[in-house]
Image (spheres, grey):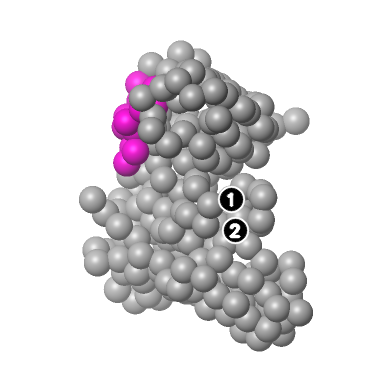
Amino acid sequence: GQQVMQIPQYQHVQEGEDFTTYCNSSTTLSNIQWYKQRPGGHPVFLIQLVKSGEVKKQKRLTFQFGEAKKNSSLHITATQTTDVGTYFCAASLNRDDKIIFGKGTRLHILP
Amino acid sequence: DGGITQSPKYLFRKEGQNVTLSCEQNLNHDAMYWYRQDPGQGLRLIYYSQIVNDFQKGDIAEGYSVSREKKESFPLTVTSAQKNPTAFYLCASSFSGGYNEQFFGPGTRLTVL
């Protein structure tokens, strides 16, 4: 079935460094959603990208959807301890399909 | 106060017993989902329902059963046939279609002794 591959699986960064997680698919996607799950918590929706080449920003977070709509990235500038958690991408092949989650990238911040 | 609730937060059961996890939402969402999450792992879809009285198997449905008799409720039963039931179970809901964000409940951590 459809798979959404997310890399890296784990990432350790020094506080203040940047962080990027990538989401890739072999097929064209209809949309990409990003979620964050804090340790011990539940996933919370961050943003959705729909258009080819779309870029959206939320403070220090930048989300990008590839031109071919087969990949996406989440970039965090100058990480803070509050950024700790697991970041999931999720995507669907078409508007009426349910979304499929990637396996997530777990971010650890070193003080 | 709108939202999605799961109960209980922690659940302990003896091996061989069936157990039912509760999930309720008052967001008027058509679709509801059950995911399983193991330590350090992603979200694996167990079952989902897009309308009352209808549901579909996800990627790991074996050993689980669900019902959707009401729009607001989507209980999950972990049966004794599930070989490794100890996990964190997350329920989610959304309006139908992949363009709608999913709202997650706080989760139930099931431990089978």
User: Relative to residue B86, is residue A5 drawn left or right?
Assistant: left
Residue A52 on the magenta span: no
In the image, residue B97 sits, relative to residue A6, either above or below, namely above
Q: Position of residue A83 (x, y in %)?
A: 68, 68
Question: Which chain letter matches label 2?
Answer: A
Towards the viewer: B16 or A33 = B16
Under circle 2, the secondary element is strand
Q: Residue at x 49, y 73 (%)?
A: A21
Residue B9 in view here: yes
In the image, residue B45 sits, relative to residue B73, either above or below, namely below
In the image, residue B78 sits, relative to residue A45, either above or below, namely above
For marks 2 and 1, give the CA distance.
Answer: 5 Å
Under circle 1, the secondary element is loop
Residue B60 on the magenta span: yes
Type of residue at label 1?
Pro
Q: Residue B10 has which mark?
A: none
Q: Position of residue A59 (x, y in %)?
A: 69, 73
Q: Are marks 2 and 1 in contact (CB under 8 Å)?
A: yes
Q: Which residue is mark 1?
A: A43
Residue B94 in view here: no
Q: Which residue is mark 2?
A: A36
Per the rendered image, the range of residues in magenta is B54-65
Quadrant of the frame with the C terminus of chain A: bottom right
Packing grade of label 2 (10 A; few <14, some 14-19, many >=20) is many
Q: Residue at x 66, y 32 (%)?
A: B10
